[in-house]
Amino acid sequence: MVAPVLEVTHVFCCPNRVRGALSWNSGPGGLLAFGTSCSVVLYDPQERVVITNLNGHTARVNCVQWICKQDGSPSTELLSGGSDNQVIHWEIKNNQLLKAVHLQGHEGPVTAVHALYQKRASGVAFRTLMVSAASDSTVRVWSKNGSEGRPPASLALCSSNCNSMLRCDELCARAPREEELPHSGFIPLFILPVPILACGDDDCKIHLFVQQNDQFQKVLFLCGHEDWIRGVEWATFGRDLFLASCSQDCLIRIWRLYVKSTSLETQDDDNIKLKENTFTIENEGIKIAFAVTLETVLAGHENWVNAVHWQPSFYKDGLLQQPMRLLSASMDKTMILWAPDEESGVWLEQREWTPEIVISGHFDGVQDLMWDPEGEFIITVGTDQTTRLFAPWKRKDQSQVTWHEIARPQIHGYDLKCLAMISRFQFVSGADEKVLRVFSAPQNFVENFCAITGQSLNLVLCNQDGDLPEGATVPALGLSNKAVFQGDLVSQPSDEEELLTSNGFEYQPVAFQPSILTEPPTEGHLLQNTLWPEVQKLYGHGYEIFCVACSNSKTLLASACKAAKKEHAAIILWNTTSWKQVQNLVFHSLTVTQMTFSPNDRFLLAVSRDRTWSLWKRQDTVSPELDPIFSLFAFTNKITAVHSRIIWSCDWSPDSMYFFTGSRDKKVVVWGECDSSDDSVEHNIGPCSSVLDVGGAVTAVSVCPVLNCAQRYVVAVGLECGKICLYTWKKTDQVPEINDWTHCVETSQSQSHTLAVKKLCWKNCNGKTEQNGTEGAEWLHFASCGEDHTVKIHRVNRCAL
């Protein structure tokens, strides 16, 4: 089998911050499906890898639901609903997308979806009922007959008292199973192929609908909750249906639905019995009365209960088993597993569980990323106000390597915009504030990093200067990570001691506690014990920081901020040893969008919102102890400019002879040659390539540090639509330049980002490439991040470019 040219090897993301954005496929080897921004991600929790991305929505995915099979085998169909008012029905085969059908009809964001397989009369194929609720105050039922490829039919479902404030937050439906048929004298609900639908509403009621003559009719509403319903779910126990509901009133209610026996009507009315809500359905001329009673009320959460789920049923000895266990999740940051006591029947909390290693990532747009100089880990920043560090987990005696988030060096109060690596364990970040902040890795991180990635601790520590702090903590109402040294460590009080000493009103800061890890940390550890101490603040800009770059020698730092005037658009150069300002470079009239030093550190390139670029040359100094001085070497203006829109990105060729610019005008242009030995005052550097039209707005450009096998430059171009294209370029010395660009490969729909690509960064090869033993091919790696909350690592077959 021929290896692909471009692969996505690792993906970092997390579910959207909405209820219902996660669904776990039942059965062995079941996949987790969750919404990330506009995508649905299929994740294998056993292998801890992302299998694929399902891209089809154009706005945030709000809800995801696998369509469970009645035989307990893994599902092959999936529903998702989004803020683009769409429901998408996905068919999966061999963990890859087979077909996607878009269901149109809602006029507002879809907030809940559910589905079931309904067995029809004998000789008629089964059909799939799919139900969706949206903020347009409607619930829609979609019907798909068999496995045919026609778009499902749509049936509108609306209650008579529907008003503009109505919203169905969660809905479930329950289908009958043959093995559940009882052997009693009366006929319960699930003998008849009559689906029942429960809708939780913002009127604090649960509305029940039953299908009659291919229409869903409202038969009952259940009162009891005192705030919005947040979740409902059905389960079958014996001959009865149980409905669990949760609400913003912090309570869980369990309702029992059963056939109402006629013998009960003759009983003495003086007997104490539970209040019943009754309704009658008719199917094939048979009328049956049903009753709904409140089985129990579960109180244990201290905040809104967002979701409840019954433990999935399973087969044992050929019989379907439904455990009576309920899992709830709450805004109080806890989950509770409930089950009735075998003796008393009272529902109680069960044992405490420990968290597993799972996928993680940013929950908002990722703005910038960098590889460390050794290519061993990636640091990212995003508008979720966090800096995250991802590294490989190398286990002993196992060849498989998975990447995980192993540190969260910065948890800030402003949206983070940019970062630059100063050394392997030191970086600077810029946010929507006027200050640049410098961070250095603490001792505890270095120890855990080496243990997780298989590095030699002694070798890593020998390259560090001085005594390292143990960790960092953030003071109350502070934005700066304060270093914690060995003498600052205090023992953590127990829960009982903390309860006795606390008055309940004072703020208790999260204390750092060092710990040695042999596997990637959990979320609680990431929040508390992986901060990096802040070692320096850099003041000088008048507006929010927008971009930053560090020289390859790690001695100079360049930064720029948002600007609408020339004096504010100046680039500030900083000495990374003394952290003093070295020089202000004034040229652009609007925000500088990106800067990059040439590989030989002789030039600094800047591109701007004013549609021009500027090239600054480093002057030779008499003494190496003196700070370097940069002077304007070349530039474009309104007359010489090629780009007609904002220039978003730029990068250098590995030999420092050419630089590349990418703009919103869909163009990528190569400029050069840049001669560092030229000491003349004025230089006219113009395009040395044909103008490459990539067909979409360019938001990121990155040049590979090594050439392909044909000795051509390899250029990755990220687009506003989320696609990444790979090109090769070589100067032809023809006038004009023709056939100098070659399109090699581009990301498929599942490999692409769903929103704008914000940054591309190639891994530093250091003269080495990864060898594939079976194919003998050389692989190059680059990372990408985007507004879709996702970070991806790609690998490219160098010899196939």
Image (spheres, rainbow, N blue to C red):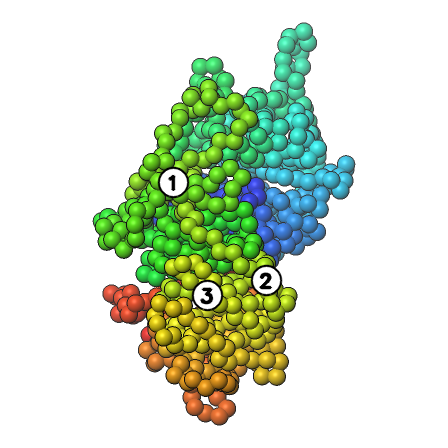
- Residue at point 58%, 78% (across, down): 643
**Type of amino acid at the residue the image marks with label 1:** Val
Q: Decide which of 714, 659 is in the foreground and name it.
A: 659
**On the rendered image, what quadrant is the N terminus found in?**
bottom left
Instruction: Estimate the spatial distance between the alpha carbons at disc 3 and disc 1, rounded to whole Å.
Output: 31 Å
Label 3: which residue?
582
- Residue at point 51%, 42% (across, down): 478
Q: Position of residue 350 (x, y in %)?
A: 43, 25
Drawn side of residue 785 relative to residue 201, left or right: left
Label 2: which residue?
562
Answer with mark 2 or mark 1, whichever residue precedes in sequence: 1
SS label for mark 1: strand
Instruction: Estimate the spatial distance between the alpha carbons at disc 2 and disc 1, rounded to whole Å.
Output: 34 Å
Which mark is nearer the camera, 3 or 2? 3
**Type of amino acid at the residue the image marks with label 2:** Lys
Query: Can see residue 106?
Result: yes
Query: Can see residue 334?
Result: no
Answer with mark 3 or mark 1, whichever residue precedes in sequence: 1
Instruction: Estimate the spatial distance between the alpha carbons at disc 3 and disc 2, rounded to whole Å.
Output: 20 Å
Q: Decide which of 652, 484 is in the foreground and name it.
A: 484
Q: Which mark is residue 597?
A: none
Quarter of the image for residue 763 reads: bottom left
Query: Are the residues at dot 3 and dot 2 in contact (C-beta closer than 8 Å)?
Result: no
Label 1: which residue?
484
Please tell me how crowded label 2 is: few (under 14), some (14-19), or many (20+) other residues with Cα within 10 Å.
Answer: many
Please tell me how crowded label 3 is: few (under 14), some (14-19), or many (20+) other residues with Cα within 10 Å.
Answer: some
